[in-house]
Image: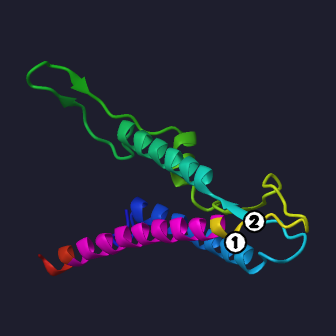
Amino acid sequence: MNLITSRTMDITKLAMDGLMDRQQAISSNIANVVTPGYQRKEVAFENQLAEIIEKEDLKDYIKGQNSIEYIPPNVDVFTGEVHQYRTPTLQEKAYLKSNTMADFKPQYVTDIYSGANTDGNNVELEREMMDLSKTGTKYLVLSNLERRQFTELSNVILGQ
């Protein structure tokens, strides 16, 4: 693990990127609320983020079950059991080196299921304002999480 980055910070950054894209889509929807024929846009990224978290969890599990360095057998003095570590297979090594976050790309989706007005526009201003507020709140929570991570890192560096 790098001193400056962590899994939490990496995933938080991806989530914040997805929320920024969502906020842009909502802003576009609001700007086109009276445009005839305009179909509202949505941004989906939560499933991709969940997959990334699952893959990172699997990496942690593999790391926990294996040891790349040779560690001599460890004998438990109470039970006499020998705890041995194994080295990861080539597939596991390749998986551990893979960048699971590189393929993250929020998906823009046109909402064709919402009911349209007589002019073909399906944007509801109230819904967009509510979505904008929810997105802003989620972004604020994530930015506070990032701030806390950096504060903790700063305290470690300063010896506090």
Give the mark nearer the N terminus: 1 vs 2. Answer: 1
Question: Is residue 83 within the magenta segment?
Answer: no
Q: Is residue 102 visible?
A: yes
The residue nearer to you, when weighing 80 against 129, is 129
Question: Is residue 128 within the magenta segment?
Answer: yes
- Residue at 41% from the left image edge and 40% from the top image edge: 61
Circle 2 Cα neighbour tier, 10 Å, few/some/many (<14 / 14–19 / ≥20):
some
> Residue 25 — which label?
1
- Residue at 50% from the left image edge and 72% from the top image edge: 136
The residue nearer to you, when weighing 69 against 147, is 147
**Residues rendered magenta in the picture:** 127-154
Residue 21's place in the image compared with 49, above or below, is below
> Horizontally, is 127 left or right of 90 in the view?
right
Q: Is residue 93 visible?
A: no
> Residue 133 — which label?
none
- Residue at 64% from the left image edge and 71% from the top image edge: 21
**Amino acid type of the residue tagged 2 in the rendering:** Lys
Report, in whole angstroms, how far the alpha carbon at label 1 lies from the one at label 2.
6 Å
> Horizontally, is 46 left or right of 142 in the view?
right
Secondary element type, mark 2: strand
> Horizontally, is 147 left or right of 119 in the view?
left
- Residue at 85% from the left image edge and 70% from the top image edge: 38
Q: Quadrant of residue 33?
A: bottom right
Residue 119 in percent (x, y) is at 91, 68
Question: Do residues under tags 1 and 2 come within 8 Å of each other at their CB atoms?
Answer: yes
Residue 72's place in the image compared with 18, above or below, is above
